[in-house]
Amino acid sequence: MAWVQRGKKNKIVNGNTSGTNIAIDLLIQVELLAQQPNHKKAYSNISKVLETLTRIERHPESGLFFSWYSTNDITTVGSRNLSSIDNLHLAIALWTDA
């Protein structure tokens, strides 16, 4: 994840994210849906992630997500590699959220 809890402030540790990071966040948000004080925020977070996934660039021929994206402007980072494992993790998280 891009954030680490530090007291009451968050600190960015890495300005990039991967399909696996997004998948883990989605699964955490699904778990938070079950907790009464957090369910509205979790629902909002899930909606934002799903909306963002519709906007980020994917591999034109396969439709797979690239390995790394900037969390600042959702552009691809680095060599635009594809990771079948990252895409699998994301697919499983999306299926779990459905």
Image: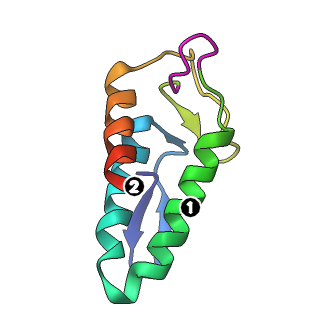
Q: Secondary structure at mark 1?
A: helix
Q: Position of residue 51 (x, y in %)?
A: 63, 51
**Three-letter amino acid code at the position of disc 1:** Ser
Q: Position of residue 4 (x, y in %)?
A: 39, 62
Can you tell which quarter of the image residue 59 is in? Answer: top right
Please say whether residue 19 is visible from this viewpoint: yes
User: Does residue 1 appear left or right of residue 63 in this picture?
Assistant: left
Q: Which residue is mark 2?
A: 26
Residue count near mark 2 (Cα–Cα under 10 Å), binned few <14, some 14–19, many ≥20: many
Residue appearing at x 55%, y 45% in the figure = 15
Label drawn at residue 92: none
Q: Which residue is mark 1?
A: 47
- Magenta span includes 4: no
Residue appearing at x 39%, y 38% in the figure = 90
Q: Which mark is first along the chain, 2 or 1? A: 2
**Three-letter amino acid code at the position of disc 2:** Leu
Please say whether residue 71 is visible from this viewpoint: no
| Chief SS of the magenta region | loop
Dots 1 and 2: beta carbons under 8 Å?
Answer: no
Instruction: Tell me the colour scheme of the image.
Output: rainbow
Q: Residue furthest top?
A: 61
User: Does residue 72 appear left or right of residue 15 in this picture?
Assistant: right
Q: Secondary structure at mark 2?
A: helix
Q: Position of residue 25 (x, y in %)?
A: 39, 55
Q: Which residues are magenta?
A: 59-65
Q: Residues under labels 1 and 2: Cα distance?
A: 10 Å
Q: Residue furthest front?
A: 98
